[in-house]
Each structure stands twice: as C-alpha cells, then as structure tokens.
Image (cartoon, helix red, strand yellow):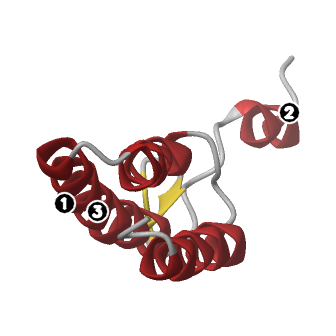
Amino acid sequence: MLDPSALNAAAPAADPPGTFFGIDGYVLLAGLIFSAIGMGAWGYGKKLELWKPKAIGVAMMLYPYFIYNRIAVWAIGVGLCVLLWFHHDE
C-alpha cells in the first residue's frame, strides 16, 4: 500500500511567486534593459571603429545569460554602464 506522504514528496515544487519558469522577473527585466544598452554600445563602437565600446556592448548582451542572481545581474549591469560611460570615446 502506498503512503500518501510519499506521493506529495515526489511532486515537483511550484515556482515561487514572481518567477517565470524559475527565472526571476527582475532578472528578465535587467537582461532586457542591459542587453538593449549593450546593443546600442556595440553599434556605436562598430560605427566609429572603437574596440572598447564594442567589447563592453558584447559583455552587456551576454552576461545575463550566465548570471541568475537578482542583485548580481543589476550590479554587473550598472558596473558595465559606468565602464561604458568612461570608455565610450577612447
């Protein structure tokens, strides 16, 4: 005879509130915002043939795919924006 508590233990856990398929909504929003800024930086660097804005732009477009912590995604994005601000015309 099956134990009813064993059936509940085998059920998959529901996603926490505010998540979309296990990914936090704030992480998705940060990825969208910083990827758009990165695309603009990459286009700017390509147009003016500057390697620093292109590299920062690529980093901004790619890092949200690898980082899932809410605070880390926003901190890295803001840090890359500050870096872009100081190296956009060199």
Instruction: Tell me which numbered mark, 1 or 2, is placed earlier along the sequence.
Output: 2
Question: The disc labelled 2 sits on which kind of residue?
Answer: Ala
Q: Nearer the viewer, residue 50 or 83?
A: 50
Quick one: SS at disc 2?
helix
Inter-mark Cα distance, 1 to 3: 12 Å
Instruction: Tell me which numbered mark, 1 or 3, is placed earlier along the sequence.
Output: 3
Q: Residue at x 46, y 41 (%)?
A: 62
Q: Please, which residue is most extreme toward the front here?
A: 90
Inter-mark Cα distance, 1 to 2: 53 Å
The circle drawn on residue 32 is: 3
Q: Nearer the viewer, mark 1 or mark 3?
A: 1
Circle 2 sits on which residue? Answer: 6
Q: Position of residue 51 (x, y in %)?
A: 41, 43
| The N terminus lies in quadrant | top right
Circle 1 sits on which residue? Answer: 40
Q: Nearer the viewer, residue 79 or 23?
A: 79
Above or below, 33 against 39 in this view is: below
Q: Nearer the viewer, residue 64 or 68?
A: 64
Q: Position of residue 14 (x, y in %)?
A: 56, 54
On screen, residue 15 versus residue 37, left or right, reads: right
Q: Residues within 10 Å of mark 2 (few under 14, many from 20)?
A: few
Label 3 with label 2: CB-CB less than 8 Å: no
Question: The disc labelled 3 sits on which kind of residue?
Answer: Leu
| The C terminus lies in quadrant | bottom left
Quick one: SS at disc 3?
helix
Label 1 with label 2: CB-CB less than 8 Å: no
Instruction: Tell me which numbered mark, 3 or 2, is placed earlier along the sequence.
Output: 2
Q: Residues within 10 Å of mark 3 (few under 14, many from 20)?
A: some
Q: Position of residue 64 (x, y in %)?
A: 50, 51
On screen, residue 65 versus residue 33, left or right, reads: right
